[in-house]
Amino acid sequence: MKSKDVPQDDADMMRGKWKDPIYTVDEKGNYTTSYSLGWDVKNTVMQQAWDNINEKVEVIRQRVIAGDLSPVAYYMEKNIMDVSLLSKYMGIWKWTVKKHLKQKHFAKLPEETLQKYAEIFNLSVDQLKDINLIKNAEQKE
């Protein structure tokens, strides 16, 4: 592809802040790097992926509000993590993280464990425990 032909179909998903590097050919026939805001097909696929992620986050949010799951489940999903990854960050067994996803076990966690979860999710312990933050959380646009 020639440098002048690089698509610039910004879907406003990244609001022009992210540009993909693409190898192109300049006017002299040399390979160079150009940047693209995206193209329609890629933007559509990316939007579908983000919609899917946001739907999953909303399902978990509703389950946390209902008391079925702990806030750890919400923040894990919101940060696009799974039990395996979170257990590695926490330095604990996967089954232990699964246990912490249940509200009844989360309510009994020691301050040290809560602090570690809070750090991973870039929150304070109070924010981690505050269900009202989750209730009032808005879906990403």
Image: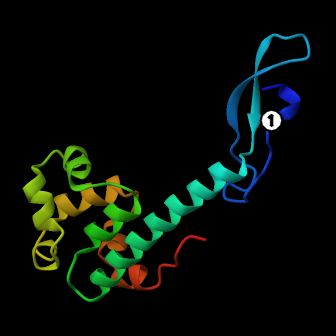
Relative image position of residue 41 (x, y in whole percent): 66, 51
Measuring 31% from the left and 86% from the top, which residue is drawn there? 65
Relative to 24, is 98 above or below?
Answer: below
Q: Is residue 39 left or right of residue 8?
A: left
Relative image position of residue 44 (x, y in whole percent): 63, 58
> Tag 1: residue type?
Val
Which residue lies most toward the bottom here? 66
Measuring 84% from the left and 27% from the top, which residue is drawn there? 3
Q: What secondary structure is marked by label 1? A: loop
The residue wearing badge 1 is 6
Measuring 44% from the left and 64% from the top, which residue is drawn there? 53
Question: Would residue 124 be seen by someone viewing this image from the given angle?
Answer: no
- In front here: 19 or 39? 39
- In front here: 43 or 119? 43
Q: Is residue 132 left or right of residue 96?
A: right
Q: Give neighbour class at mark 1: few <14, some 14-19, many 20+ (Cα, 10 Å).
A: some
Which residue lies most toward the right here? 27
Relative image position of residue 22 (x, y in whole percent): 70, 29
Q: Is residue 3 left or right of residue 81?
A: right
Relative to 21, is 97 above or below?
Answer: below
Relative to 61, is 16 above or below?
Answer: above
The quadrant of the picture occupied by the C terminus is bottom right
- In front here: 44 or 70? 44
